[in-house]
Amino acid sequence: MADDTSIFVGAGDSDQHLLLKYGNRHGLIAGATGTGKTVTLQTLAEGFAAYGVPVFMADVKGDLSGVSQAGGDNPRAIERARQLEIDGYKGRAFPTIYWDLFGDKGHPVRTTVSEIGPVLMARLLQLNATQEGVLNIVFKVADEQGLLILDFKDLQAVLQWTAENAGTLTTKYGNVSKQTVGIIQRALLTLEQQGGERFFGEPALDLKDMIAVDASGVGTINVLAADKLMESPKLYSTFLLWLLSELFQIMPEVGDVDKPKFVFFFDEAHLLFDDAPKALLDKIEQVVRLIRSKGVGIYFISQNPLDIPESVLGQLGNRVQHALRAFTPKDQKAVRTAAETFRPNKKFSAAEAIVELGVGEALVSFLDAKGVPTPVERCFIAPPQGRIGPVTDAERAAVIKASPLAGKYEQEIDRESAYEVLMGRATGGQLSPEEQPPATPSTGQRRRGQYDAPPPIQPPPAPSGPWGRAPAPPPPPVQDRPKPEPRLREAQPAPVPSSPVPRTPASRSDTITTTIVKSAARTATNIAVREASKAIFGSGRNSGVLGQILRGALGGIIK
């Protein structure tokens, strides 16, 4: 592909082109509401698709869905084409696949809780550092035990087990409090009430279905219906961030290519960075910086360039800046910042031009053939060929029905995972009468209770781990043995374990007189023993008989 293969974006004093070979150097489309950002997005998306590059974009307002229908009949589009001298301008329908997290306006989009991971799940649930730490422990224990956390009920079941075994887990993984688990459970309940549980489950989205071209080589435009999703901004931003991270994981390294392998348009980009912790911002910056070598281009769409962190903004080589309104000091700062991000043009002041731009007019700067940003130019944006505006319900239904993915994601699958495993262990693995397996016929083995075979020796109980008892080992193979001779005597009953004989209290039948006599005898005996001891061993200065004998013996030795 030649170096001059490019997308025609607009024209002013000169034509403005975005070179395809630098399409993966990322970009920014910024501007106030109603200045033409959506039309610019559609023009770029159609340009990439026309050259066989698959595209993904979120349809926040519902007016990007018209890309599946031929346009060319919009009076403003016709006038702009005439103004830019676009010969033979006509409408064109592009291959489109509609997606919807809720499954109402497109193919359902699902992923598993395990694929989302604890970091994004903590952001989605708006957890603090302590609560995120406990959530990491939950994922760690589930991984060690081979438990699949696929949907909401799996995560809730594992959290419930964690709370019940908090004391045991604390000694191994650190402090796990029931109160923290309760907070996470309440956050899950809130997300479930917002419809977030429909995002988790199977079949999970296969990103290869998005990275596709049609039979004629035109790239597929994937449109996510996000008008309802925007009611849950955290869910919207978390889904798109997960999509970016998955693209980073599955796409191979390709280096510098003639055109991107996939282009990702991130509308309302400020939602991605609002209240994001530093660790997450560092991850986003890493993905944006490294995903370029995988042939993926990321284009952020936002009202204000200040919505994008500087570490990310510096990675965006292609810029389209629509009008900004400088009504407040903050707005004036945004205008200056936007103007300073462009390479200056001696012909005009970018800061003054930004507030003077009309609808469909923008300041643009793209990378030239050497990869250097061109000086900022003022131009009119070229009109898209697809319909400008939404499709009707009937048109959308027809596109979904004719989609090559029709029927692949519509039916939800609920296979055995953490919830079923933990519930089975909690009930002892017992089955209901309807689930009981059919009885197997006898194979000639001696059964317990027969007179001619002793009861089988029960194996010791299997060691139990933190998730319950380990599965019992398979029974040893049965070997042919000679039939034992029949016993003539009757089977003896099993011995009954003897119980300890209870102690009987001491008899209290002695009379008062007998008790007094016994007490007096004990006293007399004690006195006699004491006096005899004094006579033998002595008391005080009186050394007694034994002392006199010792003194005599010692005196004789000395003489």
Image (cartoon, rainbow, N blue to C red):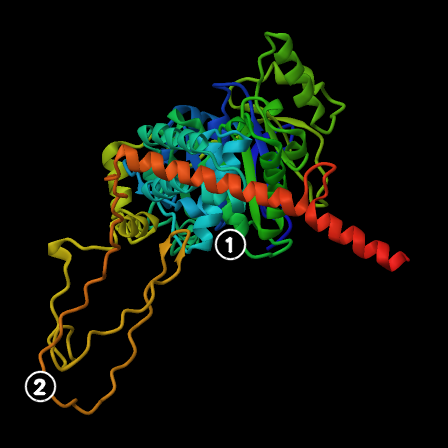
State the residue at coordinates (23%, 40%): 509
- Horizontal side, residue 220 vs residue 417: left or right: right
Q: Quadrant of the N terminus?
A: bottom right
Read off the residue under disc 2.
Answer: 488
In front here: 490 or 447? 490
Q: Quadrant of the C terminus?
A: bottom right
In front here: 457 or 190? 457
- Report which quarter residue 443 is drawn in: bottom left
In front here: 278 or 358? 278
Where is residue 525 shown, x and y percent of the image?
Answer: 47, 42
Where is residue 481 shown, x and y percent of the image?
Answer: 22, 89
Read off the residue under disc 1.
Answer: 250
Label 1 crowd (10 A; few <14 / some 14-19 / many >=20) = few
State the residue at coordinates (38%, 47%): 149
Where is residue 384 shown, x and y percent of the image?
Answer: 45, 34
Can residue 279 be seen from the camera position used here? yes
Establish if 311 lies above or below 289.
Answer: above
Question: Please, what secondary structure does the residue beneath circle 1 have?
Answer: helix
Question: Please, what secondary structure does the residue beneath circle 2 have?
Answer: loop
State the residue at coordinates (11%, 55%): 433
Q: CA distance from mark 2 to mark 1?
A: 75 Å
